[in-house]
Image (spheres, rainbow, N blue to C red):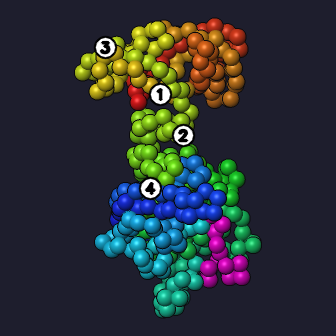
């Protein structure tokens, strides 16, 4: 399937709504974002953060209050959706219930008045891509949610758009099918090489499919980076708490070198493998992920307040000088499991502590 992936550039994109009870609401504020051709970018954040509003503005369903939407080399801010060279996959699939799979996929091609032979070739190729060759005569009511989502995906791709948009496409599927479909979407996106903008509130979904994740809150971009960057090196406490689980502790910088930094954490010195611009003596906040806590040895002491067996891991809550921190110990069958009310020693993986 041939597509000509296009670059998307959002410049100072802003959307303000006027409401009867809250007055002026800034849903999106001065958003600058560059998406390269063929890149898979996810907009991620809590409800009301502005991610869906951005997608709707890119799609042409919502006019921006100010700013520009550049697709390829063209400012499309004032163009209608059909003039923007976009495909879109909706949350509720938006299939025509009275048309079979073949005609659902071919509908847009027929509107473009393409020759019947080309429509047939493109639709058959699309059905092979999602392994649904035998489903062409079925109507949506005869298919599962996952099958309908596949049809919605290739219906968008068959138009060979420059950019593909997804609006929470997996939220109506059960947990196991969501995992399967997200892998399917990513596989097809890589095969086709299409520029993709994907909206979700599911962190694991965003981490699994994205080249780049855009974390948003209150209409403002908080961080843009690879899944690894936003998880391991969050730009602020909001990102640290929103992506995965995080323990955030107070510390003081007592020494630093060209290779590491020594912190005083609850009265105990601890060296981490991060170089910072802070001066010695500065008070800082540090992020420690639960899986970065080493249970059973180390300079710190705590009491176990919760110990839960999860199969492949043991989850703990530890009372550390009056502060509750979360820890995860993997493969507990091969390790000591500490019950509640146990006093234990622990440490942090020095390469995994991140100074905000």
Q: Which residue is mark 2?
A: 242
Question: Quadrant of residue 1 in the image?
Answer: bottom left
- The mark lying in front, picked from 4 and 3, is 4
Residue shown at 52%/50% (left/top)? 218
Q: Is residue 73 left or right of residue 124?
A: left
Could you give the CA–CA distance between mark 1 and mark 4, rounded to whole angstroms?
28 Å
Alpha-carbon span between mark 1 and mark 3: 19 Å
Residue range in magenta is 91-104
Quadrant including the C terminus:
top left
| Marks 2, 4: nearer the viewer | 4
Label 1 crowd (10 A; few <14 / some 14-19 / many >=20): many
Is the residue 59 above or below the residue 312 in the image?
below
Location of mark 3 (residue): 255
Q: Where is residue 100 drawn, in percent x and y?
A: 67, 80
Which secondary structure lies at badge 4?
A: strand
Give the residue number, with chain letter if any, for mark 4. 29
The reply to whether discs 2 and 1 touch (Cβ–Cβ < 8 Å) is no
* Magenta-span inclusion, residue 180: no
- x then y, percent, for residue 39: 39, 58
Cβ–Cβ below 8 Å for labels 2 and 4? no
In the image, is 280 to the left or to the right of 99? left
Q: Chief secondary structure of the magenta span?
A: loop
Element carrying mark 2: helix
Closer to us: 53 or 294: 53
Q: Is residue 114 visible?
A: yes
Residue nearest the viewer, comparing 281 with 133: 281
Element at label 1? strand
Q: Of the residues under marks 4 and 3, which one precedes in the sequence? A: 4
Mark 2 surroundings within 10 Å by alpha-carbon count, few (fewer than 14), some (14 through 19), many (20 or more): some
Residue drawn at (48%, 67%), measured in percent from left and top? 57
């Amino acid at each position: 399937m041939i597509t000509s992936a296009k670059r998307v550039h959002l410049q100072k994109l802003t959307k303000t709504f006027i409401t009867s009870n809250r007055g002026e609401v800034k849903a999106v504020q001065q958003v600058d974002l560059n998406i390269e051709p063929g890149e898979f970018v996810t907009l991620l954040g809590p409800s009301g953060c502005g991610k869906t509003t951005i997608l709707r503005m890119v799609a042409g369903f919502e006019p921006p209050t100010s700013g520009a939407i550049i697709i390829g080399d063209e400012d499309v801010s004032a163009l209608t959706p059909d003039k923007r060279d976009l495909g879109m996959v909706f949350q509720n699939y938006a299939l025509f219930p009275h048309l079979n799979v073949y005609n659902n996929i071919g509908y847009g091609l027929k509107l473009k008045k393409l020759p019947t032979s080309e429509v047939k070739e493109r639709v058959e190729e699309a059905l092979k891509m999602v392994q649904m060759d035998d489903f062409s005569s079925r109507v949506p009511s005869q298919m599962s949610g996952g099958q309908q989502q596949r049809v919605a995906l290739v219906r968008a791709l068959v138009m060979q758009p420059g950019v593909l948009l997804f609006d929470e496409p997996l939220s109506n599927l059960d947990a196991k099918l969501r995992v399967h479909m997200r892998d399917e979407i990513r596989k097809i996106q890589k095969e086709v090489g299409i520029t993709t903008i994907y909206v979700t509130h599911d962190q694991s979904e965003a981490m699994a499919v994205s080249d780049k994740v855009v974390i948003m809150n209150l209409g403002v971009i908080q961080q843009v980076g690879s899944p690894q960057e936003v998880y391991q090196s969050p730009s602020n406490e909001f990102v640290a708490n929103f992506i995965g689980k995080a323990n955030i502790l107070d510390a003081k910088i007592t020494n630093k070198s060209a290779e590491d930094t020594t912190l005083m954490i609850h009265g105990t010195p601890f060296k981490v493998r991060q170089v910072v611009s802070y001066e010695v003596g500065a008070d800082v906040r540090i992020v420690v992920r639960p899986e970065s806590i080493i249970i059973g040895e180390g300079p710190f002491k705590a009491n176990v307040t919760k110990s839960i067996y999860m199969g492949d891991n043991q989850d703990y809550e530890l009372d550390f000088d009056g502060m509750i921190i979360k820890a995860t110990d993997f493969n507990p069958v091969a390790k000591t499991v500490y019950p509640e009310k146990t006093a234990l020693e622990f440490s942090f993986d020095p390469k995994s502590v991140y100074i905000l």
